[in-house]
Structure formats: C-alpha cells, structure tokens
Image: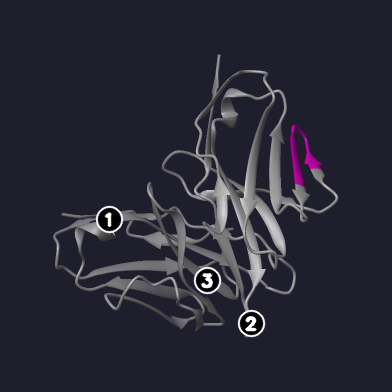
Amino acid sequence: RKEVEQDPGPFNVPEGATVAFNCTYSNSASQSFFWYRQDCRKEPKLLMSVYSSGNEDGRFTAQLNRASQYISLLIRDSKLSDSATYLCVVNMWITGGGNKLTFGTGTQLKVEL
Amino acid sequence: DAGVIQSPRHEVTEMGQEVTLRCKPISGHDYLFWYRQTMMRGLELLIYFNNNVPIDDSGMPEDRFSAKMPNASFSTLKIQPSEPRDSAVYFCASSPDRVVIQPQHFGDGTRLSIL
C-alpha cells in the first residue's frame, strides 16, 4: 500500500463548479499535512496547510480526519486558473531527527468553460 | 528575494555519462531536499540535508547516485554512470526550520533526459 494515495483523475469540471479531492495516508504517526499545487511543467507550490479543525482560504477548504487517516480539499466556484495537479503531502518526524515529507502522485483538475 | 536556484534547467546526455545537478537553497534555510518526479512514481524524496549534513538518504535509488552539500549555499546531485531510466525531473527544495513546520520552497527543476 502506498504511504499517500490519491485518485489521479483527471477531474474535468465546468467553471463555477465545486470539486472535492480526497487523500488517504497509511502511517498513523503522521503529524502534519499539506496540499501543494503543481502547474504543468512547473515546480510544486504550497497551497495550504491542513489542520485538525479544518481550515479555509478563500474558495479552498481543507479537512483532516485523523481517525480515518483521510484528508480532503474542496474548491468552490472553480476558475479556469485552478486547472493544475493537486498534491496531498504528509509530514512525519523521523527517529533520530528531521522530518520527512511524502507526496501523493497528485490529482489532476481541468476546469473548462 | 531569490528562491531556490537549480541548474541546468535542461540536460540531455547519453547513457553512461556523468550528470551533475546543482542547487542553491534560499539563504538562511537549514534544510535542503532533493526529489525526483516521474509520471509513474510521482514525486519521490531522494535525500535531505540539515545544516549541510545528510540526514536521510534512504530514497537514493542506488550507488550510481550521490549527493553532497559542501556549504550552506550549494548542493550537488550526481549520477554516474547515467541510465535511460534516470530520465525525470529533479527538484531541489529548501525549508527553514523543523521545529515549526514550514513549507518547502522548490526550485524550477532540472529536466533530465538520458538517451
């Protein structure tokens, strides 16, 4: 089983739609969680952190369910510019020091007119 | 402010040649990471450094891969000899501090093609 699993998509949605991505992680010791966005042929960039209480940033809402080891990202009123690949990222402290980010393979979103 | 700087942006070389990828992290960032991204496997962590010291190299695929960080502002990832299956985008990233979780800032990547 992969450490971080995502539906690869693509999700093709019309402009203005609401779309949700899910992500599951296998290691219950994981400590922090993020969503990154990656545009075609570009580097990944942090979209938002994910907190246990859930958090919102404009049209984007992230949720974490530790019991189910599940993370979600909701995008409301999607825009053409939201078209990208969304990477679920899990962070864990490593015995002996340091931390380790594990990236999912990403979910591709295409927003269409 | 300058971000993470990688060079070269693109590299095309023949199988068996030595390849050296370079990275300059953001000034003041104590952590430096090397990743490889392919369609099949996504983004994989190869190795990371803290204060120039390698902490975890368990992601380095095999002995053909080596990474160094001789000082706080420079790191290299070397492949010798290179093979076609090494073709991928290689990203370098840096972050400031592990005590407070900080996002990683990625460079533009090096697109490597081994013929």
Secondary structure beneath dot 2 equals: loop
Residue nearest the viewer, comparing A29 with A62: A29
- Chain designation of label 2: A
Q: Which of pointers 1 and 2 indicates the residue nearer the eye?
A: 2
Q: Residue furthest right?
A: A53
Residue B10 percent coordinates (x, y)? 29, 53
* Numbered mark located on residue B32 in the image: 3
**Gap between marks 1 and 2, in whole Å?**
32 Å
Question: Circle 2 is placed at which residue position?
Answer: A95
Residue occupying image coordinates x 42% and y 74%: B75
Residue A45 percent coordinates (x, y)? 58, 49
Secondary structure beneath dot 3 equals: strand
Q: In this view, does B77 lie to the left or right of B73?
A: left
Q: What residue type is labelled 2?
A: Thr
* Numbered mark located on residue B87 in the image: 1
Query: Does residue A55 show up magenta in the picture?
Result: no
Q: Same subunit under labels 3 and 2?
A: no
Q: Please, is residue B90 above or below residue A36 in the view?
A: below
What residue span does the magenta drawing correspond to? Answer: A56-63
Residue B15 percent coordinates (x, y)? 14, 62
